Amino acid sequence: MKPSDGNNNPNRSVNDAPLVSLRQVGKNYATPAGRFTALQNIDLDIQAGEFVALVGKSGSGKSTLLNLMSGIDRPSQGEVRVGGAELHQMSETGLARWRGLHVGVVFQFFQLLPTLTVVENVMLPMDFCHVRAPRQRRERALELLKLVGIVEQAEKLPATLSGGQQQRAAIARALANEPPLIIADEPTGNLDTGTAEAVLDLFRNLVGRGTTLVIATHERNLAGIDRTVELVDGKIANSARIPTAQLTQEVLA
Ligand SMILES: Nc1ncnc2c1ncn2[C@@H]1O[C@H](COP(=O)(O)OP(=O)(O)OP(=O)(O)O)[C@@H](O)[C@H]1O
Ligand SMILES: [Mg+2]
């Protein structure tokens, strides 16, 4: 199977198991006011190679859902499977180990380690997961920084880079262990329009190379998206192959 063409790929067999599969997933939080249901009855399949946009109002549950797919958090109910791993069955330690090899996560505020240089930040996932021989890690990190267009920033500290450059470094870090899945939570939310578009171009490029990408976003008119999944009050209100632009103003507000 060539995963790069998303769900429209004519070569994809209907029997291909989804890369991400959520069944009746719920998430509750204990709050001083009692139990709060952030997600309920979520059924969602994402095929390998898809570029999926997760949209919905602030508080609708986008980050909560992404955190369950990336194994950052665990569901209160239901089943979360990613690439055959049963995340709902795994311990915290097991999840952390699994995550390092199987998912790359990109956050709105980059979350680079401030005391490490850019190239060292990109090497971190390889160091943690003992991926590649230590001597090859820097070389691989530099290749990734070249891919995202900031190799000349490699030896600088993150704080000396622009927001867009820091986000590119974070994307390079997310790619370090060649995860099949990238999860990005409002990755352009802190960037100006031009820089955001460049980051989205980079994502489209990655999808073209076969990476599966799920992105939470407030942006409309995202080009290159295979599918838009809309959350309303912790439930999936819509999961269709339609451009974000066609969703209601209210949902995206
Ligand atoms: N740790 C927590 N404890 C209690 N409630 C939480 C916790 N995390 C999230 N929530 C609540 O769950 C709901 C969903 O939050 P979530 O962060 O997933 O929304 P979101 O769609 O990502 O919003 P935004 O667009 O503002 O990032 C919100 O009402 C939020 O207040
Ligand atoms: Mg969020």
Image: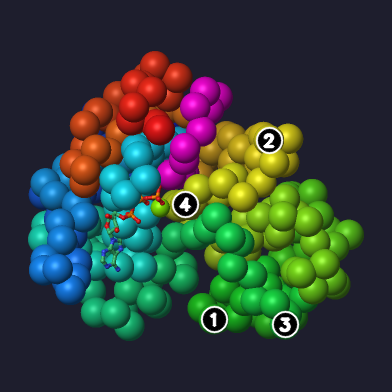
Q: Position of residue 189 (x, y in %)?
A: 56, 46
Q: Main secondary structure of the magenta part?
A: loop
Q: Which residue is mark 1?
A: 128
Q: Amino acid at mark 4?
A: Asp
* Label 1 – label 2 distance at C-alpha: 34 Å
Specify the quadrant of the image occupied by residue 29: bottom left
Tell me which label, 2 or 3, sits earlier in the chain: 3
Tell me which label, 3 or 1, sits earlier in the chain: 3
Q: Position of residue 127 (x, y in %)?
A: 60, 81
- Helix or strand or loop: what does disc 2 sit on? helix
Magenta residue check for 235: no
Tell me if residue 136 can be seen: no
Q: Tell me the number on the disc at residue 115.
A: 3
| Circle nearer the viewer, 3 or 1 | 3
* Label 3 – label 4 distance at C-alpha: 24 Å
Q: Is residue 251 left or right of residue 26?
A: right
User: Mark 4 and mark 3 in contact (Cβ < 8 Å)?
Assistant: no
Q: Amino acid at mark 3?
A: Thr
* Label 1 – label 4 distance at C-alpha: 22 Å
Disc 4 under 8 Å from ligand 2? The reply is yes
* Label 3 – label 1 distance at C-alpha: 17 Å
Q: Which residues are magenta?
A: 213-224
Magenta residue check for 223: yes
